[in-house]
Amino acid sequence: MYKKFRKIEYVGLILCLVEIIGIVVISLLYIFNSLNFRNLLTVEHFAYISIGITIIDFLYIFIVLFYIHSKQQKNDINTVEIIGSDLQEAYSFGKIGFAITDDDDNVIWISDLLEINQVNLLNKNILQTIKETKQFINQNENYTIEVTIGNFIYQIRYLKRSHTYIFKDVTDFAKLSKSKVDEATCLGIILIDNYSDVVGTGEDNIDVITQVRSKILDYAKKYSFLVKSFRNDAYLVITSYKQLQRMVEDHFSLLNEVRELGLHEVIKPTLSIAIAHDFNDANKLMDMANQGIDLAMSRGGDQAVVLRFGADAEYFGGKTQSVEKRNKVKVRSIGDTLINLINQSSNVIVMGHKTMDMDAFGSCLGIKAICESFNKECDIIGSLADCENKVDLAINKTLKTSDLWISKKEADNKAKDKTLLIVVDVSLPRNVVYPEILDKCNKIIVIDHHRRAEDFIENTILSYIDTSASSASELIIEIIRYCSSSSQIKLNKTFATFMYSGILLDTNHFKSQSVGIRTFEACAILKEYGADTTKADDFLKDNFGEYKLVNEIVMTRVVYKTDSVWYCKSNGINQTATLAKAANQCMDFNELHAVFVIGQTGENEVRISARSDGVINVQLLCEKMGGGGHFGMAAAAFKDKTTDDVEKILLDTLDNYLDEATNNKAEE
């Protein structure tokens, strides 16, 4: 068809040229009267010649238009002429069709399959009609796209040399594939976070647990999944991927429904949910679900975790703060395990997070005291350069630095098969002082009070994550006091003072929502060991320059849509602690639920320090930006970004996730 059209074009062009040449020749002969041409060719003759040429042109145009029209309407070039009757049957059986275009991508022919399926492409530009076909530009002939046209789904491939589009009808396969995905088995667990605490508060709260169970069963009916109790506080969930997607779109409203049951209760019931999918082994899915529950609990509970095999976990909920639920029996068990592991090791190395604050350093000193009490060599990785300014000044005033630190190179030399590495106040591998040491030690212990993120230190032999604790120093002093070997542990006054200062820092002098009864008990224990509370407070005091800088940062505050959420931005290079102090100072204002302080902390680093009064989960928001922390205290760091870039990231995050992070009931 394409070649025939080209022939028609050539014939028309030749005819046109002949006519033009003839007219020019006749005109020249007439003008110059060569060969007495004027006498031979009169005006009447000119008229007859013009009429004849016009009639010939008209007839040619009419014949060409009639030919093209008849070819397009009747589509008399059928599949049989192109591929033969046998191949036609094969293509019909395989549900394969064709569309041929001209040089301008206009469809000049379609096969029977496309006509039967009412794919209206004839005489239309295929790039405009099926916009996905633009993907074929600059692609090889093996490239395939999938499009939906009407009620049919096609895979399309383009053969450039012949201007041919091959359509394969995959509707049945696509529907079957989607059905298989939708009906894939998903396994999960629903856990009542604080079952023993709720039941233990009195008979009235047994009714609350009954209501919780009723909510779970109602939710199961709503989303058509099987739920079976296998423990007083836990349920097995069996569902399909289609129903799981419905729950995801609903953001697991069961969490809110259960939370509302405890509005007037002393101990509020909450749930942790973990559902695993995208693996064909039920045992593996169950292992993933158990890991998801551990992950949800380590992050404070009251949230759902969806785990897809080979992908990052998705989190939903987390709108309430962790309830203080530690008990001395658990602490003693953790402490005894820690001491046994210390005794079995050849030496101990301890480290905190980058730019160590008073809590991280105080926690390191607490671990050092435990190790030295059992005559185990213990070294802290880092140097004064790895500490905040206040920690640096406090160490220089009170401690011999030569007895504290080992360099990264020395840590490599001391890391042996039986070396025990203890990481405190951090659980993200990228945030520790020396990440490479994690791969050099076979035995690793993590002690932290921040919510656990997906990126967690791997292969730990003991992980003690308690998000209801105010600080890592609080966790470690509890271990010292309540372990079975408590009487053997010696904690000197200076170490106790640093740990006390760490608690002051992380609780903003006991103003934080994470402060509980055990926080004050921990402080009392440190006081018994001789902690100097006045000196601990002095460690955290600002000089006038820093006080002025903090106030300048606060004065840059910008209100985000509502007076209850602010953000501030500093354009200079600041200490991380300065940003935190500015955030803490903002939280002293009335009716402010959350604040985010943006500032540059290095040549290529910008950080956000976030604080909340408990209404908004700033940890969830910072996690969306690649950070983490506590419900009411969190942070995020950005490499190779400007403060303006980070401001835009923050605003986009608030636009998308602020409602999800807001606990409206707490606000009421």
Image (cartoon, rainbow, N blue to C red):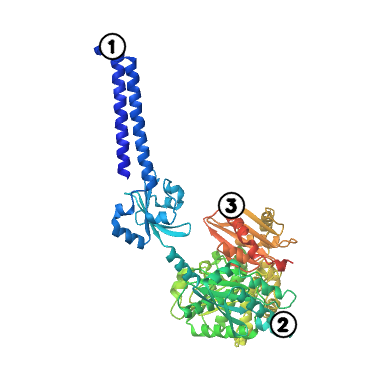
Q: How many neighbours does mark 3 have within 10 angstroms: few (below 14), some (14-19), or many (20 or more)? A: some
Instruction: Say which element carries label 3.
Output: helix
Report the mark closest to the observer, 3 or 2: 2
Placement of the N terminus among the 4 image quadrants: top left
From where the camera sits, is residue 171 visible?
Answer: yes
Report the disc number at residue 207: 2
Q: Report which residue position mark 3 lands on.
A: 644
Q: Residue at x 35, y 28 (%)?
A: 55
Give how far across and how far down residue 381 sits, in percent.
51, 71
Q: How many neighbours does mark 1 have within 10 angstroms: few (below 14), some (14-19), or many (20 or more)? A: few
Looking at the rendered structure, the kind of residue marked 3 is: Asp
Where 77 sits versus 481, above or below?
A: above
Query: Answer yes or no: do the residues labelled 3 and 2 have beta carbons within 8 Å?
Result: no
* Quadrant of residue 260 within the rendered picture: bottom right
Report the disc number at residue 39: 1
Looking at the rendered structure, the kind of residue marked 2 is: Asp
Disc 1/disc 2 C-alpha distance (Å): 123 Å
Report the disc number at residue 449: none
Give how far across and how far down residue 185 sits, in percent.
50, 75
Q: Earlier in the sequence, mark 3 or mark 2?
A: 2
